[in-house]
Image (cartoon, rainbow, N blue to C red):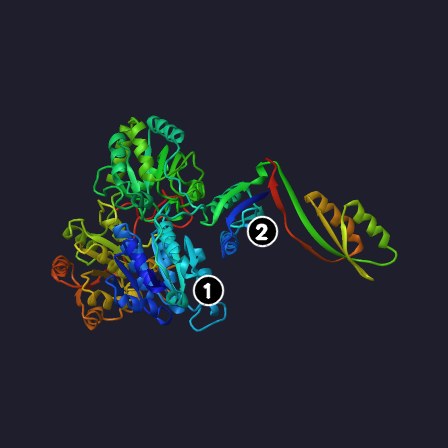
Amino acid sequence: MKMTGAKIFIESLKKEGVEVIFGYPGGVVLPIFDAFYDSDIKFILTRHEQGAAHAADGYARATGKVGVCLATSGPGATNLVTGLATANMDSVPVVAFTGQVKTSLIGNDAFQEVDVSGITRPISKHNYLVKDVKNLTTVIKNAFHIASTGRPGVVVVDLPVDIQIQETDFQYPEKAEIRGYKPTCKGHIGQIKKACKLIANSKRPLLYVGGGVIISGATDKLAEFVEKTGIPVTMTLMGLGAFPGTHKLSLGMLGMHGTAYANHAVQESDLIIAVGARFDDRVTGKIDEFAPHAKIIHIDIDPCAISKNVTVDIPIVGDANSVLSDFNKYTQKPDISEWHKQIEAWKKKFPLSYKNDSRLRPQYVVEEIYNITKGKAIITTEVGQNQMWAAQFYKYDTPRQFVSSGGLGTMGYGFPAAIGAQMGCPKKTVFDIAGDGSIQMNIQELTTAVINKLPVKVAILNNGCLGMVRQWQELFYKKRYSHTMLESCPDFVKLAEAYGAVGMRITKKSDVKKAIKKALDIKGPVLMDFRVEPEENVFPMVPAGQPINKMIGALA
Amino acid sequence: MKKTISVLVENHFGVLTHVSGLFSARGFNIDSLTVGETEDPSISRMTIVAEGDEKTLEQVKKQLNKLIDTIKVIDLTEEDFIGRELILVKVKLDPKNRSEIVQIADTFQAKIDDARKDTAVIEVTGDENKIKSFIEMIRPFGIVEMVRTGRIAMGRK
């Protein structure tokens, strides 16, 4: 049956099971938007393309499905760039469609033309420019396959406007056939057995678990492995929720703002089992002094990640779920009761803490959100101190609960991501933990939340400054607060109301609990302006260039 | 150290950009890069000579493999391979050195593609050592211009 490119686009997305698209219209996507008018596919109109990209990303992280966003050419496409780079750095499956000027004008500096393929090449897993409508279905099939398999990532599909109008028969391919792309899923059995032998003989083993475990759906197999071996678990920012944070064998997060006991455990360990993590600099600190006594087993689906930063003793390329399944067949329990005692001692000596007085402190707000939501909410974050406190003081027991820009660290991510997560998980409570700086970067999405009746709760930890940068200026630049004071502007309550949302201001510690409960009862988006202590710092902290056991502020 | 890497890629629009973009983004040093169709017109072969330490070059191979358009990466440095390059050298001519230059060309089985009053273009094909020796022999006469294809290579197996 003959269809236009625009109609083929919509039918292809339906074949891929796409339920929602986030985006913004423009000149060269008019044919697609005209086709949307007759279609029942859910389209969420954001108020900035960056919001659409972050929403697609938040949707993907919360649901495990591929996130889809759509923008027009030129500025529409370039406005997606930050969002796509954010998603790609954290291996989130997103397919981004951009309109493009007609094929005969490409390269001519036409109105609203940019080289999208060139601009997004370094921040995407792959990209396509469709030059013939007959290739459109194959491109879309391949795009979704590439985005969602192996190590997931962003795929950008550039659609010239004349392709959207051209007609051809609609035939959707059954399978994606890409001869240059065959990710390895099953780990090498020889390596796995070797690794299990090391584990059986280890005295101070440690599991170092990252986002890859969540992407792979390996949390059950990981729990089984921990049950069999009794090995304690530390998680990266991206891995929070891969293992229950409330479990007694959980050491919480490691690295620059991780718990002191996790960092000490790494530095004293004799065997590190890395699963779906990439030895990022936020985790390793001074790399040549990282885990000095440990042998390293590294399980990852991406061969590039193995031995990239840290030389590994037993590399295992494969999907975490499959490899851990095999581990569970061969592994034996090591004798590590002394190690457990040492870890308990560290936990007692170096708990995460903050001053518990009458002042309204940001950590208290996060703790109360945790208590009142019973640890079951989806928490998105902005970037900086708010992000670190959300990682430290909310305990995540299940995967896909913690949605945060880890690799790129994009301010302005949390709020649109919360919108995407709420779309994907309508029955869940979604909180964005924000700072007064970050929240302003995509504040326009309040409209999106209000109009689409998405009851996202935003907790602004308002300290009147760019918190994390101010902390570094305090600790390393003699408190020379150069341009980090945000002057407590705007009035967030009035701003929320201007958008048709509910605004609340909380200035006293004694009002926090009831404010959170009230927000949860409101059937729409709520912006909460918590006026917190201005010079509160995130501790512990591993200063730049130090090994991770040399922390500031580790003792209460 | 130098590595000669042969990469089979899809013969698609934009593949060259992906590969060269990869090298520049990761800061890898390329000495030369050539590309052309193979016996299968849907597949092109790229021959890349890269410079770096062992660890960097391992990453180069892995990153190349990761590209969607890459079908296969062969590290020829580890194999026995035949490497060839073609160069065109425009050299200064005068009646005094003319016959000497022709003799050198003969020794290297080179061809004289163009000869004018005061310049000649000499074409030489060969492995790395032959090309290097020829350039050293001809340099004293005055090289006006030189263009090289970069190495192409094929495993002997």
Q: Quadrant of the N terminus of chain A?
A: bottom left
User: Which residue occupies 26% across, 68% down?
Assistant: A37
Tell which subunit mark 2 falls on: B
Q: Residue furthest front?
A: A1
Q: How far across and how far down the image is residue B19, in percent?
A: 51, 52
Taking the image as drawn, is residue A383 in sight? no
Q: Residue A324 falls in which quadrant of the image?
A: top left
Q: Secondary structure at mark 1?
A: loop
Using residue A162 as the reference point, say whether residue A234 is left or right of it: left
Q: Compared with residue A479, is residue A317 higher up or lower down, i.e. above or below?
A: above
- What's the CA distance linking mark 1 and mark 2? 25 Å
Q: How far across and how far down the image is residue A489, in percent?
A: 27, 70
Q: Nearer the viewer, residue A68 or A342?
A: A68
Using residue A526 as the reference point, say whether residue A288 is left or right of it: right
Q: Are marks 1 and 2 in contact (CB under 8 Å)?
A: no
Circle 1: residue type: Asp
Tell which subunit mark 1 falls on: A
Q: Nearer the viewer, residue B60 or A173?
A: A173
Q: Nearer the viewer, residue A222 or B16?
A: B16
Q: How far across and how far down the image is residue A127, in percent?
A: 42, 56
Q: Residue A470 falls in which quadrant of the image?
A: bottom left
Q: Residues within 10 Å of mark 2 (few under 14, many from 20)?
A: few
Circle 2: residue type: Gly
Q: Residue furthest right?
A: B96
Q: Nearer the viewer, residue A177 or A268?
A: A177
Using residue A129 as the reference point, say whether residue B53 is left or right of it: right
| Image mark for residue B36 | 2
Q: How far across and how far down the image is residue A289, in percent?
A: 43, 40
| Image mark for residue A115 | 1
Taking the image as drawn, is residue B5 in sight? yes
Q: Residues within 10 Å of mark 1 (few under 14, many from 20)?
A: some
